[in-house]
Amino acid sequence: MLDILGTIGFDWRVAVANLVSFLIIYWILKRYVFGPVKAIIDERTQKIQEGLDKAQQSETELLVAQQKADETVKDAKAEANIIVANAKDIADQEVASAKGRAENEAKGVMEKAQAQIERDRKTMETELFTKTANLVALGVEKLLGEEVDESKDKDLKERAAKAMQER
Amino acid sequence: MNIFSVQQDIPGIEPVFLFDIFGFPIAASTAMIFLIILVFAVLALIVQRTFKTVPTRFQNLIEMLYEGMVDMLNEVTADKKRSEIIFPVIGSMFMYLLVANLLGLVPGISEITVGGSPLFQTPTSDFNTTFGLALGSIIVINIISIKEWGIFAFLGKFFKVKEVFQAFKEGIGKGAISLVDLFVGMLDIVGEIAKVISLSIRLFANMYAGQILMVILMGAFAYIIPGVWYGMNIFVGALQAMVFAVLVAAYYMLAIKPSEEGSDR
């Protein structure tokens, strides 16, 4: 067997030397190349995985926060609607109350004005009758051509005023 | 003088001996392996000094190669745990053979001579390198197999004496058939030796033939055609390195107990 291998240059010493040389290469590669490269790849893979996990977690947290925000906005809207409705009610009540007060005040003013007008009218009427009676008495004096005494004058005026008031 | 050809001597099949150290011959292939050790030592230094989590282009290349090898091994073993165990050996083998096959193609390296003999010889074109590697691999695989199965079960794969006794107890016909099994089991010992021979000669013959053809082509026409063959040699060099490493991994998987959990890719 060794003779046959010898024809293609087999020499066990060279074979052993080359095998030992390979073992040195194996040691170098295992200790200083494959080990560190594997460690770096594993570290990177772990970092990427951590990043992906964190991204996933952030996404979930974002989703939860969005839901929470939506709920808060919804609640706030509902609360705002209630507040607006309440405010409207209060405003309506206020308006109604103010309107009532204004109407009452206006009514009072109107009544006062009407009373004043009535009083003025009566005063004016009295004055008018008085002046008209004077005029009538003066006219009677002119017609009769005689002076009317003070008691007659008073009587005429009263009668004239009475006659006008009766009309 | 023909300027279109480069005449060279066809390299001999025997190893080129450079000198002796205490009666131990140092071959040109061994010198080349020392050069390869130096290359890997430099690579180790670069890895130690420059490799970081954020990779450079060179680091990317090495990592790509590393992951390619891991994937290839996972394909062969179909078992990640097993792959992790044998990766350093198979990966080292692949990288060593790849560099060994390709370094010889670097122009000028084989032209350096000492006393008229080339200082460096492609390690894989020396049968001693491939034989030593193949023999070492098969021995290690058998040691692992003994550890896995136990010495008696391991020997039982080759010498099925127990089965023969049991078969003869059941009947002469079955006993006769079991004798065939005994013979086949013994043939497996030859199979183990054949693994060493086939592994070593396949790689050696491919690389040696590539070298010879290169010399012949250079002698016929030194332009264009050798370039094509050069490219082919690069491909063959990488392919043979891969074939050797994959076969060793496959032999390893055949030698160990099948995984109970099944495939775990």
Image (tube, coloured by chain):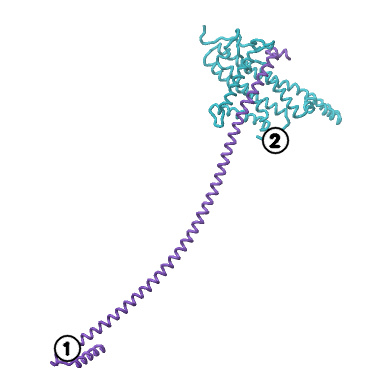
Residue at the spot 70% in from the left edge and 14% down from the top edge: A13
Quarter that holds the C terminus of chain B: top right
Q: Is residue B84 above or below residue B31?
A: below
Q: In this view, does A47 lie above or below B51?
A: below
Relative placement, left or right, of B87 versus A138 is right
Specify the quadrant of the image occupied by residue B14: top right
The location of residue B208, given as percent across then percent down, is 63, 15
Other residues around mark 1 within 10 Å, as few (<14) / some (14–19) / many (≥20): some
The location of residue A82, given as percent across then percent down, is 49, 61
Residue wearing tag 2? B262
Amino acid type at image mark 1: Leu
Chain letter for the residue marked with disc 2 in the picture = B
Residue wearing tag 1? A138
Q: Residue furthest top?
A: B1
Q: Nearer the viewer, residue A1 or B37?
A: B37
Amino acid type at image mark 2: Gly
* CB contact under 8 Å: marks 2 and 1: no
Count of numbered badges drawn on the protein: 2
Q: Residue furthest left?
A: A145
Relative placement, left or right, of B115 versus A167 is right
Tell me which chain appears purple. Answer: A
Residue at the spot 23% in from the left edge and 84% down from the top edge: A128
Specify the quadrant of the image occupied by residue B112: top right
Per the rendering, the colour in which chain B appears is: cyan
